[in-house]
Amino acid sequence: MSLKLYIAGPEVFLANAREIMDQKTALCRKYGFEAICPGDLDIPPAATKRGFGLAISKVDEDMMDSADGVIANLTPFRGIAADVGTCFELGYMCAQGKLVAAYTNVAADHYQRTVDYYGGRTVDAADGQTRGPDGLSIEDFDMFDNLMLHGGVERRGGHIAIHAAAPDALYTDLTAFEQCLKALAGREPAMPRDEGKRPEELDASNDD
């Protein structure tokens, strides 16, 4: 039976979203996976915009619940960081102990993108932090996005793919997406961790 992968990313906002999702679905099938994509199911209209939004949220969570893992497109979206909905979905899957992989089509790391956001107007403060002109400190951990995103994937042994896509193909270039599929091929779904235990506690208990 094929492992099911939830396909998370901001491409759902593209005018040709269905086309891109179909391409991702075909690639998943090529590597022996079944893709579960937002937008695969028709959602009945609701009486209010909020009601419709809540219905979409439920459908997407149900899809993730039925999946064995996720590939999250964390390419910066409408700013210097990943799409917030995709961030939620990645965290949701990490919390369930499922297979996780992530990619970005921007090669510059989170620190450099933040410095660029400030136009290079940063200072090395007396407390050892690099800060922007607004006084806010800047993360500098050699990670491609916020430490909770990069760290959440890496600490679970998930694959991270970084690719410098052309500016006009940030959300359509599937090179890094395919790298994630190659890395996940042949792996088994991760087992949910015991509730209330930290990873190091579980590792210690497994040595007994």
Image: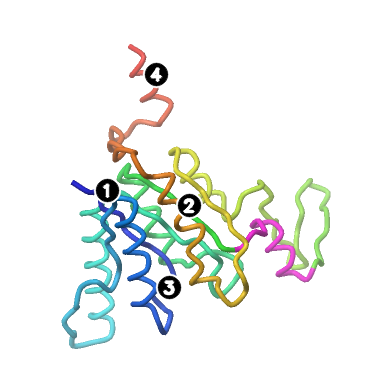
The reply to whether callout 3 and callout 4 are in contact (CB within 8 Å) is no
Q: Which residue is mark 2?
A: 179
Mark found first going from the N terminus, 3 or 2: 3
User: Would residue 26 appear left or right of 42 to someone viewing this image?
Assistant: right
Quick one: label 2, few (<14), some, or many (20+) residues within 10 Å? Answer: some
User: Marks 2 and 1: which is nearer the front?
Assistant: 2
> Whole-Å distance between the Cαs marked 4 and 2?
32 Å
The magenta span reads 106-119
Q: Which residue is mark 1?
A: 68
User: Marks 3 and 2: which is nearer the front?
Assistant: 2
Residue 114 in the magenta stretch? The answer is: yes
> Whole-Å distance between the Cαs marked 3 and 2?
18 Å
Say which quarter of the image contains residue 157: top left
Report helix, strand or loop for mark 4.
helix
Quick one: label 1, few (<14), some, or many (20+) residues within 10 Å? Answer: many
Residue lying at 83% horizontally and 58% vertically, measured from the top left: 123
User: Marks 4 and 1: which is nearer the front?
Assistant: 1
> Whole-Å distance between the Cαs marked 2 and 1?
18 Å
User: Marks 3 and 4: which is nearer the front?
Assistant: 3
Q: Which residue is mark 3?
A: 11
Q: Which residue is mark 4?
A: 204
Report helix, strand or loop for mark 3.
helix
